Image (cartoon, rainbow, N blue to C red):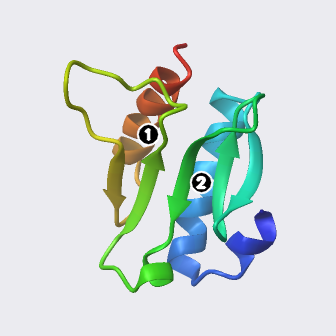
Amino acid sequence: MLEKIAEMPDDEAFIAAKLHDLVREIAPELQPKTWYSMPAYANADGKVVLFFQPATKFQSRYNTIGFNDAAQLDDGAMWPTSFAVTAWQEDVANQVSTLIKRAMKK
């Protein structure tokens, strides 16, 4: 999975590496893997909980951090599961940290 990060443009690789560090810190039980050629993190059952979609993969305007149904982000009848990320800053790290904790019900 880390080799996929190394193949990304510098700005995307920076965000992906920061996300990787954050996941390792908050949810070390999640296993890094490559999922559809994207960095992802799976639970003990092998289900992808969250992933990083670099903008260049789909020629998009922004990178995306997404959560699959294995994440427990449920909040009523509707809730977001993907988040656009254009830069990694302290406030972004804090928001992503909160989401990872919610996804893991920590």
The residue at which mark 2 appears reads as: 18
Res. 15 mark: none
Note whether 102 is above or below 49 in the view shown.
above
> Residue 103, image x and y in percent?
49, 26
Note whether 79 is above or below 72 in the view shown.
below
Circles 1 and 2: CB distance less than 8 Å? no
Note whether 30 is above or below 88 in the view shown.
above
Closer to us: mark 1 or mark 2? 1
User: Quadrant of the rendered structure where residue 30 is?
Assistant: top right
Front residue of 55 and 10: 55
Q: Residue at x 40, y 53 (%)?
A: 89
The answer to whether residue 88 is seen in the rendering is no
- State which tag comes first along the sequence, 1 or 2: 2
Looking at the rendered image, the quarter that the C terminus falls into is: top right
Measure how far apart labels 1 and 2 are at the Cα level: 11 Å
Q: Residues within 10 Å of mark 2 (few under 14, many from 20)?
A: some
The residue at which mark 1 appears reads as: 96
Q: Residue at x 21, y 18 (%)?
A: 76
Give, as a three-letter code, the residue at label 2: Lys
Front residue of 54 and 47: 47
